[in-house]
Image: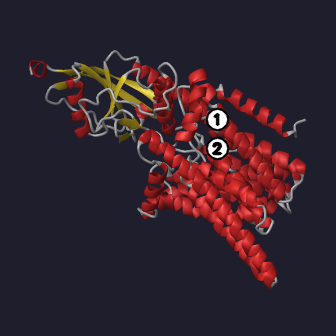
Amino acid sequence: MWRRPVVAGVVLLCAYVGLSFLNSPRGFLGTDTGGKVATLEVMTRGEGITFDPDLGYWAERWDSDGSVYPIYFTAHIGRRWVNVTTLPMLFAAAPLYDVGGYRLALLLPMMGAVAAAFATRALVRRLGADERAGWGAFWLIGLASPLTIYALDFWEHSWGVALMAWGVVLVWDVVEADGRRWGRAAVAGALLGLSFTMRTETLVYVAVTGAIAAAMLGVRLTREQRDGARVVAARAASAAVAAMGAFGAVAFANDLLERRVLDQGIRGARATGVASLAGDAPADRITEAAYTLLGAGGSTSGVLLGSTAVALLAWGVVRGRTDEWFGVAVVAGAVGVIALRFGDGLGFVPGLFVAWPVAVAAIAVAGHRRFPLWVGAAALPVVVATQFRGGAAPQWAGRYVLTSGLLLAAVGLVCVLALPRLVQRAIIVAAVAVTLAGCGWLAVRSHDVDRTIGAIEARPEPVIVSRIAHLAREGGATYGERRWLTAIDTGLFHEALDVVAAAGEDQLVLVELADAYKPFEATDGWRPIGRSERLRLFSGVHLRLSTWQRTEHTFSQ
């Protein structure tokens, strides 16, 4: 019964639903989620769904260019204030959010993770493993991988990974059939096109998958007789045209949707922006590459811990083939090193190979494992070189390279099956341990965000001014209930004061990082009054809240 696809899919989905109740629906894994939830709030707040992602701005009449707009990274497009990067996911979630709020909207990323688990099963079966191993891969990826965490937060990563992985599966089928099955090529192109509407890095995986498929077919052409080579070339060309046509059609339809809703395309603009910044700031790129691939935390010590853990995992896999107990001991040592990362509390594990222990086996002992290994490994340096800078540390498992993680994990699972049973179990325990830490961190973080935003918004002051760029974005679940402004430096703070004064308000509460920011001093027309309040955001991160009052000099004006 457990090996029936419908039953397995429903059970995995139910497991996600159960895990989601450990988290607060008013706190998230990252600030990007807050921006999406704020948009869903606005789209569903009235009578019926508007399908208009305009967040609005309470202070627009006094700050028309949005200098102190509350939610960071919001674009002013025409009359709209927009904080989304993908419309299909948002529009699909709006009816669910309207009926059951955030918890019901989470069904979308959950179903994406289920689809990704099925894609892993398909890859493992095509790598030569039996049915039992295929289902083992399904459950391991579904319940003991980074996709478990991304299934519990409203982000489009689970669907992006699932669509890209299924695209790779279908392209591989076309290659194995010497270019036949152009229908599968068309479906693969459509899936990759849909993935592109959500994830910009899809373009890298499309290019890498196409190049490797062409190279494999090219090698086969050299081995065929003349007439046979012509047939294979014709089939391959037909499949390529079908795939590219389907990809282009979906991308074009999404562009039309964006222009219809927002009067401009956003996915194409993001892709152009990423390409224009590829390889800039080499030193920062190298640092973020270390975080993305090997970091157990967002610091140099985290990278050292992650590198040590990955090296031990690889050593345990290699030695475990001939010395079972030694391999188990080394893998256990890797788990111990990862545990050191959480010595001072739960937090992010940004490293791909730290969060996907099974993927390490693909690099350590895979050998000649054909298509998935080549695509996953070849895409890594390109994605790392082109990913957005500044967000490598505060993320789980290198969110831009999750597809490589899944492809390498599929290959790694087949390799792990060839190891002695105790070594297999040790590696699975490592995967489960890291995933549990991720689920724990999401639970802690979501409740901390909920508690903190709730405490700030319970303040009596009519306006909240944050010096922390993404704090108001964290509070997307309550967007619009209070008036926020975000002013990250002295100049913007003065602009915020002018906005508050123009709005006719006499007080505001200023929110700062208590241990990092030097308090602002009184300025012409405004001064802090009373004692400041100290509030914990996360473990080791505290906020300082102070009330500011307009002076009589300002009133007389």
Q: Nearer the viewer, residue 125 or 78?
A: 78
Tell me which amino acid carries mark 2.
Answer: Trp
For the residue labelled by badge 1, is the local secondary structure a helix, a strand or a loop? helix
The quadrant in which residue 455 appears is top left
Residue at image coords 67%, 43%: 147
Which residue is tagged 1? Answer: 108
Disc sitting over residue 73 in the figure:
none
Label 2 close to label 1 by CB (< 8 Å): yes
Residue at image coords 31%, 39%: 488
Q: Nearer the viewer, residue 391 or 448?
A: 391
Measuring from the top left, give residue 14's x and y in whole percent.
75, 29
Which residue is tagged 2? Answer: 159
Measuring from the top left, give residue 148's x and y in whole percent.
68, 39
Residue at image coords 57%, 26%: 97
From the viewer's perspective, is 253 left or right of 172?
left
Q: Sequence-wise, which precedes: disc 2 or disc 1?
A: 1
- Crowding around mark 1 (Cα neighbors within 10 Å: few <14, some 14 to 19, many 20+) is many
In the displayed orientation, state which residue is furthest to the bottom.
226
Is any atom of residue 298 visible in this view?
A: no
Total numbered badges shown on the rendered structure: 2
Measuring from the top left, give residue 170's x and y in whole percent.
74, 57
